[in-house]
Amino acid sequence: MTIFMQILWLFLLAIPIACIAWTVTHEEVFREPREYCIRRSKEGKTLLERKFFYLFTCEYCFSHYVTIIFLCLTRYKLLMNNWIGYLIAGFALVYVANAYMSLFGLIRQDIVREKTEIKAMEITSEKAKTQAP
């Protein structure tokens, strides 16, 4: 595979990794299992138990495991054709996937802020209408 194709695969393969890691660690559809994992990560009796359940609450940590699954499924290697290529690809995919998640988080934060500002302007406008003679 050419270096161009390897880089293309890097940026494309990071998209589903980021999507899965974000969805499991942030979205409403996984809220109950995530809350269970949060509780177990805080109240677990052993260090191993607490760390295991923490993995499902942190998008950075969880993205490592999603990346390992994708590397096994795709056999994607970066720069070298041996086990070192897997290692380089793994950390590169985690890095790019987390950059995507950070950008997504900033965009969502901006959208929430704008919605809040619009709602505040609507409330102010409604108050002004009701107070006008």
Image: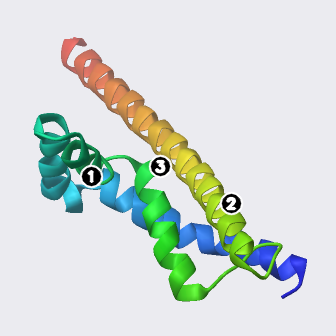
Residue corresponding to mark 1: 52
Relative to residue 46, is residue 21 depicted above or below? below
Residue 43 on image: x %, y %: 11, 36
Closer to the camera: disc 3 or disc 1? Answer: 1
Name the image quarter holding the C terminus: top left
Residue corresponding to mark 2: 92
Please name the residue shown 59% across and 54% down the image.
100
Which amino acid is tagged 1? Phe
Closer to the camera: disc 1 or disc 2? Answer: 1
Mark 3 surroundings: few (<14), some (14-19) or many (≥20) residues within 10 A? some
Q: Are marks 1 and 2 in contact (CB under 8 Å)?
A: no
Labels 2 and 3: the sequence-earlier one: 3
Tell me the distance, in whole angstroms, between the alpha carbons under discs 3 and 1: 14 Å
Front residue of 82/113: it is: 82
Relative to residue 98, is residue 131 depicted above or below? above
- Viewed as shown, does residue 66 lie left or right of 130? right
Please name the residue shown 62% across and 86% down the image.
75
Dot 1: element: helix
Dot 2: element: helix
Front residue of 41/57: it is: 41
Labels 3 and 1: the sequence-earlier one: 1
